[in-house]
Amino acid sequence: MRLTRLFGVAGAVLALLVCGMLGRLLWGEWQHYSATDSGRHTLRLMRHSMVAAEKLSSERGPVNGVLGDRAPADPARREGLLRARAATDQALAELQQALAGGARTSVLAPLYEALRAARLTVDRLAALPPAERTPERLTAAVDAMFGLVPLALDTVTGYTRASEDIYPRIARILMKVRFAVELREYAGRLGSALTVPLARRQPLTEADRRQLQFLRGRIEQLRQLIKMPSSDADHDPRVLAAVARMDMVYFGPGQQLVAGVEQASREGQGYDMDTAQFARRYVPSMAPILALRDVLLEQAQEQARQDYDAARRELMLALLIGAAILLSLALLLLIVRRRVAVPLLHATAAAVRLGNGDYTLDTLAHRGADRADEIGDMLRALSTLRANSMERQRLEQERGHLIEELRVSADTDYLTGILNRRAFTAAGNQRLRGACGRNEALAVILFDIDHFKSVNDSYGHDAGDQVLIRIAGVVRTLLRDGEIVARYGGEEFVVMPSHCGMDSARALAERLREAIAGEPLTLADGHILRVTASFGVAVAHGPYAALDDLFHAADLALYRAKSGGRNRVEVQA
């Protein structure tokens, strides 16, 4: 073939390729534009799902009130339960309407079935005399209501992930929205955990206390995850105000109300409220959590609107660029072999996706893997590289998880959950070096439990373990962020305050001593055990301070405290 004809053919082929590429680009931009528009609807669905979960959780308050009431239930409380159920039904109806029928509404079928069963269980139990409402029956009814919220949250999770796929930039905001939804649910579970004791007018069992401790831990974990800075949205005044309101209301009076019930149980006092009265005081304290969720959702919707506007601008720009390329194509003549160019373009795009971590290459691999030329070799190599990359990524993730688990296990005391001696020594040396570099004083408070051996001898090692766990919890509640506490060995504990001189360290030791002495422990057999502790305080200052010398001085002070009568604080001589 003559070169001119070859050039003409090559130009025509190139024109077709460029037009195809432009069409693909414009189609992709159009799909992105359409996806951002539908994504806003997805966010609205997610909001409806969260509201439905909220109403299901809120319904538990009136349920607890009716279950703890006489039979037949007080008409006002029964009316409150009916209003709560009507609000739940309305939220679910709005969610179903937002789904616009079709196959997607089938996800609500298990929720409706479980809701009917749970309400029937509650109604049957409320109709029984209070004496027949056994703890097992009450627990079963409460658990049935608990099981409803995860079903609703499953739809929340699905819509949240869909929104994150469409709007990657708001993934962190949506993650905190999920945290807020979970925090509201666990806060509701914390209140519902007191339903059986309040309804039966009986003290909290050890299982109840463990459950409350677990729920508090999860609530605090979610609180810290919400407050942890992860995006520019965390500095928005609306978010900061909503977080502050949540801290002031729920983590203030709300948590104090639960603590008051626990305190009354520990002291053997009667409860001054029933389940309905508790719900009326506790449920409003959770409202700021929902307000925070709504603020975060508003930010996500604002970001979605911005992404939608950006997608529209990008589509217009793509149209202009496409027109410019087509106009410029008339001036270009390239010699391209059709058998190489098209597959090579596809292979290049596949390699780029693989380099970016996108391993969805199955279709491409099957399209040309049977070719007996270099292109076929390339596609087969890409498929092999994809498989190897996925396996390496999986192994690296597993390795990271194992390293993290080993690190946490090595640094934590298995019984009390605080630092062990090894971890404390490492942290203490690091803090001592920093204090010496800044020419600051560093204090150590060493204390152990008085007559701890007699506790083990008299009540058993389980009681001794309870004492250690309780004292660790008391100390942690009194320490500020940045202050270190560890179990140094046996019944001996060590505290390292931050930026603390002798007077402040001694004052802190006194507070710890008073808190330990004033916090009785109710054993499983009903005995109330009071323990005390003796404290030794030492302070190091200067560039040549050593942690061993500081511990030795604190140990001598502790020895003087124990020799002087115990349950006292002594400082280094």
Image: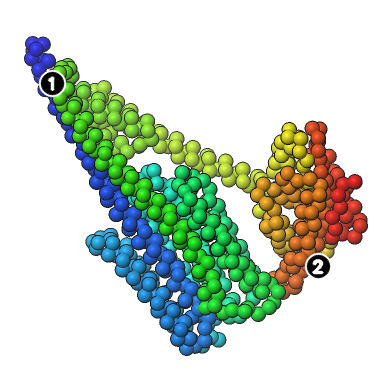
Quarter holding residue 356: top left
Q: Residue furthest right?
A: 564
| In this picture, residue 169 sits left or right of residue 375 | right
Q: How many marks?
A: 2
Residue 85, disc: none
| In this picture, residue 317 sits left or right of residue 206 | left
Taking the spot 85% from the left edge, 43% from the top edge, the residue there is 552
Is residue 17 visible in the rendered image? The answer is: no
Q: Is residue 307 above or below residue 381?
A: below
Neighbours of disc 2 within 10 Å: few (<14), some (14-19), many (20+):
few
Q: What amino acid is found at the position of numbered circle 1 in the picture?
A: Ala
Residue denoted by label 2:
458
Q: Is residue 539 above or below residue 338?
A: below
Is residue 473 visible in the rendered image? The answer is: yes
Q: Position of residue 163 (x, y in %)?
A: 35, 50
- Contact between marks 2 and 1 (CB within 8 A): the answer is no
- SS class, disc 1: loop
Residue 330, disc: 1
Q: Position of residue 7 (x, y in %)?
A: 12, 15
Taking the spot 52% from the left edge, 64% from the top edge, the residue there is 187
Instruction: Please report whichever mark, 2 or 1, sits nearer to the chain's N-terminal start.
Output: 1
Depth check: 99 or 314 in front?
Answer: 314
Q: What amino acid is found at the position of numbered circle 2 in the picture?
A: Ser
Depth check: 53 or 134 in front?
Answer: 53
- SS class, disc 2: helix
Q: Position of residue 174 (x, y in %)?
A: 41, 51
Taking the spot 71% from the left edge, 50% from the top edge, the residue there is 485
Neighbours of disc 1 within 10 Å: few (<14), some (14-19), many (20+):
few
Q: Residue furthest front?
A: 237
